[in-house]
């Protein structure tokens, strides 16, 4: 079963969320979100997904893309 292109995204952890302890972690590369430009990390798993033609973006952009304008209520 082939996935829709819009579902072929993965999130990259934001630097502001996990802090500097991830800098230098084996296989983690500090980069920028291609959507918003925030600093985030590309992980070894992200590189596998990228090679499979998935698109990476920071956690916030991925959540906006997946859940905004989909009829989901954010009310408590």
Image: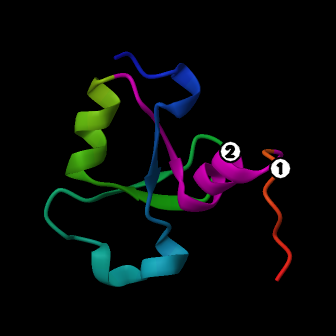
Q: Is residue 64 magenta?
A: yes
Report the residue marked by disc 2.
65
Crowd tier of the residue under label 1, counting other residues whose Cα lies within 10 Å: few below 14, some 14–19, many 20 or above: few
Q: Nearer the viewer, residue 73 or 20?
A: 73
Identify the residue under disc 1.
71
Residue 21 drawn above or below residue 53? below
Residue beneath the point at 34% across and 31% down: 50
Q: Quadrant of residue 16?
A: bottom right
Instruction: Give the magenta-colored segment's residue range.
Output: 53-69
Farthest residue toward the left?
A: 26
**Displayed quadrant of residue 35:** top right
Whether residue 32 can be seen here: yes
Give the residue displayed 19% in from the left and 70% down from the top: 25
- In-front residue for pair 76/19: 76
Q: With 59 as the anchor, is 2 left or right in this view? A: left
Q: Quadrant of the N terminus?
A: top left
Where the C terminus falls, by quadrant?
Answer: bottom right
The CA distance from mark 1 to mark 2 is 13 Å
User: What residue is rendered at 41% in x and 30% in y?
Assistant: 54
Residue at 53% over, 61% down: 39
Label 1: which secondary element: loop
């Amino acid at each position: 079963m082939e996935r829709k292109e819009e579902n072929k995204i993965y999130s990259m952890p934001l630097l502001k969320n996990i802090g500097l302890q991830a800098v230098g972690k084996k296989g983690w590369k500090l980069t920028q979100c291609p959507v918003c430009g925030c600093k985030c990390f590309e992980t070894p798993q992200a590189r596998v997904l990228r090679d499979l033609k998935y698109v990476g973006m920071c956690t916030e952009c991925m959540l906006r893309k997946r859940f905004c304008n989909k009829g989901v209520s954010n009310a408590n």
